[in-house]
Image (spheres, grey):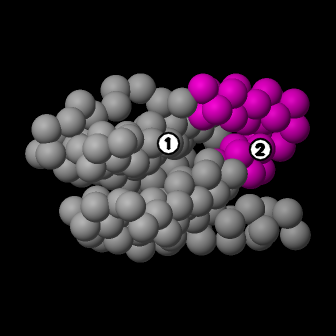
Amino acid sequence: MSTQSKIEHSLNDLIEIARDGQKFYSEAATKVKDAELAALFTRIAGSKADIVTSLSATVAATGGEPAEHGTFVGSVQKMYGNIRATLGDTQYGYVAELEESEDRLLKAFKGVLTDNDVPAPVRTEVTRLLPEVQETHAVMRARKHAMKS
């Protein structure tokens, strides 16, 4: 695999997973009754949109074609989250599924950083965005555990 296609592939995976999260958070924000939780979901959806924009610009700057869609896994997870929220505690159902979405994104980011073949520009961009991904993951994990108690 060429360096160019390696950059494109690595970043497009992150773009797709972040886009999944963006769509899921946006939808969840319209479904929960708690205004504070809806505001949190809306803010995080905006953060995901920023990640998608930033990574897409990096792919385009290297001559690649940025991903335009999410993933199949993300679609299934969103569907499952909607069902779970409909059948049980809506707020907890969304928080739990969104936290799983954060797990996926964080794992993907760490995967890119542990891949020794990832070119320096990709590593730099992923490293720059990682703290935001880690913070959102921590917020959703803490929220899930607080709601569980």
Task: Tell me where residue 117 appears, x and y as whole percent.
Answer: 38, 61
Question: Which residue: 77% across, 44% down?
Answer: 93
* Magenta-colored span: 72-98
Amino acid type, label 2: Gly
| Label 1 to label 2: alpha-carbon separation | 20 Å
Q: 37 or 98: which is nearer to us?
A: 98
Closest to the observer, 7 or 99? 7
Give, as a three-letter code, the residue at label 1. Answer: Ile
Q: Is residue 5 left or right of residue 75?
A: left
Residue at 48% over, 30% down: 70
Magenta segment includes 95: yes
Task: Residue 90: give x, y in percent of width and height.
Answer: 76, 40
> Mark 1 — residue?
17
Specify few, some or many for label 1: CA neighbours under 10 Å numbering under 14, 14-19, or 20 or more: many
**Which of marks 2 and 1 precedes in the sequence?**
1
Image quadrant in which the C terminus is located: bottom right
Q: Label 2 neighbourhood size at 10 Å, few (<14), some (14-19), many (20+)?
A: many
- Image quarter (top left, top right, bottom left or bottom right) of the N terminus: top left
Q: Which residue carries the number 2 mark?
A: 93
Secondary structure at badge 2 equals: helix
Q: Position of residue 51 (x, y in %)?
A: 33, 52
Would you say residue 38 is visible in this rendering? yes
Image quarter for residue 86?
Answer: top right
Q: Is residue 87 magenta?
A: yes
The answer, for residue 45, to whether it is visible in the render is: no
What x and y, as percent, mark residue 65? 23, 31
- Majority SS type along the magenta span: helix
Tell me the residue at 45%/53% (across/down).
44
Given this view, does label 1 or label 2 mark the residue nearer the observer? 1
Q: Secondary structure at mark 1?
A: helix
Q: Which residue appears at 58% of the width and 59% of the height? A: 107
